[in-house]
Image (spheres, rainbow, N blue to C red):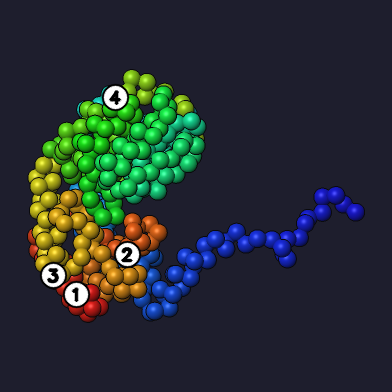
Amino acid sequence: MQDNAPVSRESDGKDLFSKFDPIIKMREDLLSSGVEDPFNLVMEQVLSPTRAICNGRETILLGTYNYMGMTFDPDVVDAGKQALSDFGTGTTGSRVLNGTYQGHKDVEDALKEFYAMDHAMVFSTGYQANLGIISTIAGKGDYIVLDIDSHASIYDGCKMGDAEIVPFKHNDIEAMEKRLKRIPEGAGILVVLEGVYSMLGDVAPLKEMVAIAKRHGAMVLVDEAHSMGFIGENGRGVVEAQGVIDEVDFIIGTFSKSVGTVGGFCVSNHPKFEIMRLVCRPYTFTASLPPSVVATAATSIRKLMHGSDKRAHLWENSKRLHAGLKALGFKLGTETAESAIIAVIMPDLGQGAAMWEALLKEGLYVNLARPPATPGNMTLLRCSLCAEHTTEEVKTILDIFEAAGKKVGII
């Protein structure tokens, strides 16, 4: 008898997919109602930052996070083409080995200039930026105090670093301070906040929260993924708008929203920050971004420094759409327009999916957000405005929402 004979597990082995059964059932129930799969839409052709062909029909895009409309900017596209021609398709290596090209230094210089900070570190995705920075800064024996509605990448960074996770009620200043008071004296503390929360589009009271965090000796990290380029006089985010940019220790952001490409970053003034390049595993052990991507990012970031007119128009679009949806009788995630995200709250997932499909058939794409990703088990139609949406397009969007809302019975 052979000792290394394979062991059969056909009869008693655990199905590792069984944990997903509730989600599988939810999806099957949703599709059995006859609606199109809202999580598998294919854009057959992208025409502009605000238009695409979906299901053979020209569709207005209202769910892409392309806030500043940089994806088709001629200078940005040309920079990517030139880098692709000059440096090829990829680096095939980590930043600490062969993966740092001149373009990677250029985009980090652009970030340092944009934020007026001493250090910038670029990751291959925004998710990786949170995963890497948080897991490296706060480890076993440290404490991370964070808003309970924080992004999945923030929670995953906490788990990977093995720090003690201390969540508090969303945007609740008093709850945050109570958690900080309970942390043992002398412990390392990182407070993690977001400028704009992506589900409801609401803004954090950073001015008060940062002040409290500093009184308790904590370092502060703010994720500005959904506010970079748009909020603040220079587009530096909520930290700039609320006057605390010089008080925070780390700002995390992404290239996949206002910058219009892919990648993530962290900027900081901490004098020891550069050591992160050697100790941050998601940075050290990941292939770097392709040269064409960093070239588009650097060009886009430098153009965003002079994007005040675009920012003003995006604010007009946001206020106009929020007021219009509210007037039509839709329930929204915020009382006023706080960002470029406007969340329309649906009664349940079934009606939310029906509304999503009705909008798509009328030529409008939005995001359908569902539990457990959403706060309070809400179903949301998440609208993300773009600086390239015209005033006429916003009016058309409102007309489509009214027609679809009446058809489905939401209004």
Does the CB distance between marks 1 and 3 fall below 8 Å?
yes
**Residue depth check, mark 2 versus mark 4: number of the one nearer the observer:** 2
| Residue occupying the point 62% across, 62% down | 15
Q: Can you identify the residue that label 2 sits on? A: 379
Q: Secondary structure at mark 4?
A: loop
Nearest the viewer among 51 and 165 is 165
- Please identify the quarter of the rendering in which residue 374 is found: bottom left
Q: Secondary structure at mark 2?
A: strand
The amino acid type of the residue labelled 1 equals Ile
Q: Please, which residue is most extreme toward the right here?
A: 1
Which residue does the image show at 42% across and 29% down from the upper left? 184
Is residue 405 visible from the viewing direction of this image? yes
Reply above or below: 192 against 336: above
Front residue (pair 179, 391): 179
In 3D space, how far apart are the residues under numbered discs 1 and 2 (Cα atoms)? 16 Å
| Left or right side of 255 for 123 | right
**In the shown orientation, is residue 79 left or right of residue 143?**
left
- The residue type indicated by label 2 comes to Thr
Which secondary structure lies at badge 1? loop
Relative vertical location of residue 270 with respect to residue 304 in this rendering, above or below? above
Q: Amino acid at mark 4?
A: Asn
- Element type at mark 3: helix
Q: Earlier in the sequence, mark 4 or mark 1?
A: 4
Which residue in the structure is indicated by mark 1?
411
Residue with the mark numbered 4: 269
CA neighbours of label 4 inside 10 A, class few (<14), some (14 to 19), many (20+): some
Q: Which mark is residue 328?
A: 3
Disc 1 crowd rating (10 Å Cα; few below 14, some 14-19, many 20+) is some
User: Does the residue at mark 2 contact the one at mark 3 (Cβ under 8 Å)?
Assistant: no
Question: Could you tell me residue 35's position as x and y percent?
Answer: 36, 76
Q: CA distance from mark 4 to mark 1?
A: 50 Å
